[in-house]
Image (spheres, rainbow, N blue to C red):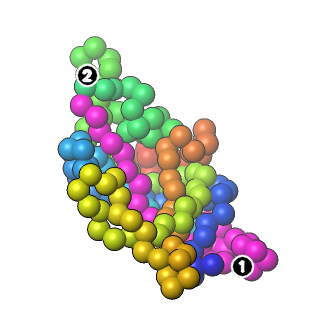
Amino acid sequence: MVLGDYSFLPTRTYRVRINQTEKKTSGAGYNMIAMKMEIIHPEAVDVEGKAVTVAGRKFTGHLMLVPGQAWGTREYEFCDKLGIQLEKDDEGVDIFDDTRHAEYFRGVEFDTELSSTETFKTYPKQPGEKEGKPILDGEGNKISRGFMTQFDVSRIPDGGLANPSKVETAY
C-alpha cells in the first residue's frame, strides 16, 4: 500500500469541494477548466482493516470545452447536476461562459463517486510510443508512483449538491 496523498482510495461516494479553477489548454488543443478539489467527507475510510484518512486529499478534475458542441458536453452536464443556472442566448439556449468558471464552481461542495488507479514510474516516451516504458525494480516489477484519484462528472448522483446556497449566490 502506498501512503500519503497517493494512497489507494476505495470506490465509494465522497463529499468534495472545489477550491480553485483555472482555464487551460489540453494536449489536444481544446480549452478546458481544471478544478482543484479536495475530499471533505468522510474523515477516514477502511482499507484492508485500517482507517486511512481521506479528508483533505486533493485532486484535479477537468472539464473539456469542445468547440461546436453544446448541451450534453461535460461542462453543461456538470452545471446541470450541480443546479447551476446558466444564462441563455436570444433563442433560449444555455450559454456556458468559460470566463466565469470561478464564479460557477469555486466553493461548491457536492457528493460524487471517486475511485483510484495505480500509476507506475516510466521512462520518457520515445517517438511513436503512446507512453514511456515502465521502470522496473531489481526483481522485474513495475515501480508504483501511487494511486491517482479518478473523477468523472457522470459519477455525480442526481441531487448530490451539498451547498445549494453557494450556487444560488454564485453570480
Which residue is identified by label 2? 89
The relative height of residue 10 versus residue 102 in the rendered view (above or below) is: below
Q: Which residues are magenta?
A: 41-67
At label 1, which amino acid type do we have? Ala
Which residue is identified by label 1? 51
Q: Residues within 10 Å of mark 1 (few under 14, many from 20)?
A: few
Could you tell me which residue is drawn at 31 percent across and 26 percent down?
69
At label 2, which amino acid type do we have? Asp
**Residue 167 screen position, x and y as percent:** 44, 46
Mark 2 secondary-structure assignment: loop
Mark 1 secondary-structure assignment: strand
Please name whichever residue, 88 or 12, is drawn nearer the observer in this view of the structure: 12
Could you tell me which residue is drawn at 28 percent across and 46 percent down?
32
**Residue 34 screen position, x and y as percent:** 33, 55
The answer to which image quadrant residue 89 occupies is top left
Could you tell me which residue is drawn at 24 percent across and 44 percent down?
28
